[in-house]
Image (spheres, rainbow, N blue to C red):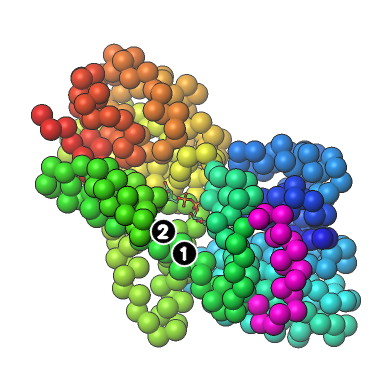
Amino acid sequence: MKITIIGTGYVGLVTGTCFAEVGHKVICVDCDAAKIKLLQEGGVPIYEPGLEELIQKNAASGRLAFRTSTREGVEQSDVIFIAVPTPPLPDGSVDLSFMEGVARDIADAMTSYKIVVDKSTVPVKTGEKVSETIRRYCKSRVEVDVVSNPEFLREGFAVEDFLKPDRVVIGVRSQRPVTALREIYAPFNCPIIVTDIHSAELIKHAANSFLALKISYINAISVLCEASGANVQEVANGIGMDHRIGRAFLDASLGFGGSCFPKDLSAFIKISEQLGYDFGLLKEVQKINAQQMDRFFKKIVDTLWVLKEKTVGVLGLAFKQNTDDIRMSPAMELCHRLRKEGAILRVHDPQAMEKAKAVLPNVTYVSDMNSVADGCDALVVATEWPQFKKLDLDRVRKVMTHPIMFDGRNMFDLEEMERLGFIYKSIGRQCQS
Ligand code: UDX
């Protein structure tokens, strides 16, 4: 199939690249000329495992091209995917102006029947608006089918998730575009569910909110574990073995972040409000998430007392492992709070330090994770990078002024930390002695 993807963010770039990888001919369009130039030269604007190799391979084979002209993209393909940002507005609702702009650009360039597929996360009923907009602005009066095809990939695992999806959701108004969409996704060998457009749009917000709810649920349980002496990891394992619940997304933490969960929760609460339903459950999910950060920060203050001029090492800046994305990162929020209290910070992240430098000045960026602890009064683990598990804990303890560790991701073994002589404070668990 000939496919055009408009928008080369996480979703658009990974979608376009993976479609090319399975044999489709893809044009990725973005209005950011500098980004397109970088991609044309073989560079990649984001860190995402495996993506660079796939882009280079498929660009070299001629199946993947990068352009700035939406008109060219529309002319060359029969199926156009929209993957533009849908950022939050100050009241939590979604800014759909990029979406509207692209719908108008597509309409302007269309001279034959097109299938327009929305991949961005949007409020329910956006498909209707996109369809109306294209029909209104299309001078050549050709036919269009608008489809909703939400994307469920996770940052850090984007290529893997895209190539091996649990399911593909296709929301349509009529059967006409279904064959083309089935053909596009046939190489992925995964279940495809065909729904109406509204349901497909709702599936995305409902899925993300449910995952966020799972995290807030286990974080609330972590409070009870701390109060009672239970261990949240054992509780998570125990409940997660029930296949109706599942173990995934039950890792207690200092809170979830990123460009999706916080934004999508606010949007879904707002959408519900507009549909006449007060989604109090999701407001509680947000509240628990905020409290989790407050509780973690309080643990640090209660232990160190005055933070002013104390040296604190922070491991992790990205909002999660395997990414350089620091948007809505709990680790960054923690750094800002520590700085505000006057702490001197030594920080490290395997990928996110460059991005952090622009918004977190006056801290020491340390390239080696084992050296972060040098001269520190305390060390904080804020992101679940797997390599932090390989920290040379013996060395870390020796070079710290005081061997105090706050672990916001439960990365280390309680007994081992005690044996090594650390004062070790994690989430929802404590040493029994
Ligand atoms: C999420 C959804 O998982 C994905 O399906 C959707 O397409 C986009 O939003 P993403 O934001 O990339 O993906 O990251 P995810 O792996 O879901 O993690 C989100 C946040 O939750 C991170 O801050 C992570 O550290 C945190 N988290 C995750 C926990 O605190 N505990 C967990 O058990 C899992």
Q: Which residue is mark 1?
A: 207
Quadrant the N terminus occupies: bottom right
Image coordinates for residue 34, horizontal then vertical, percent: 75, 47
Residue drawn at x 45%, y 35% is: 385
**Seen in the image, is 170 located left or right of residue 400?**
right
Quadrant in which the C terminus appears: top left
Contact? badges 2 and 1 (CB < 8 Å): yes
Q: Is mark 1 within 8 Å of ligand 1?
A: yes
Q: Is residue 402 left or right of residue 90?
A: left
The residue carrying mark 2 has its beta carbon less than 8 Å from ligand 1: yes
- Secondary element at image label 2: helix
- Left-right relation of 54 to 340: right
Spatial CA span between label 2 and label 1: 6 Å
Residue on which disc 2 sits: 211
Identify the secondary structure beneath mark 1.
Answer: helix
Q: Residue at x 34, y 14 (%)?
A: 395
Task: Give the image quarter of residue 190.
Answer: bottom right
The residue depicted at 36 percent of the width and 49 percent of the height is 247
Query: Which residues, given as a range, are shown in magenta?
Result: 172-189
User: What is the magenta segment's predominant secondary structure?
Assistant: helix
- Estimate how packed mark 1 is, as few (under 14), some (14 to 19) or many (20 or more) residues with alpha carbons within 10 Å: few
Q: How many marks?
A: 2
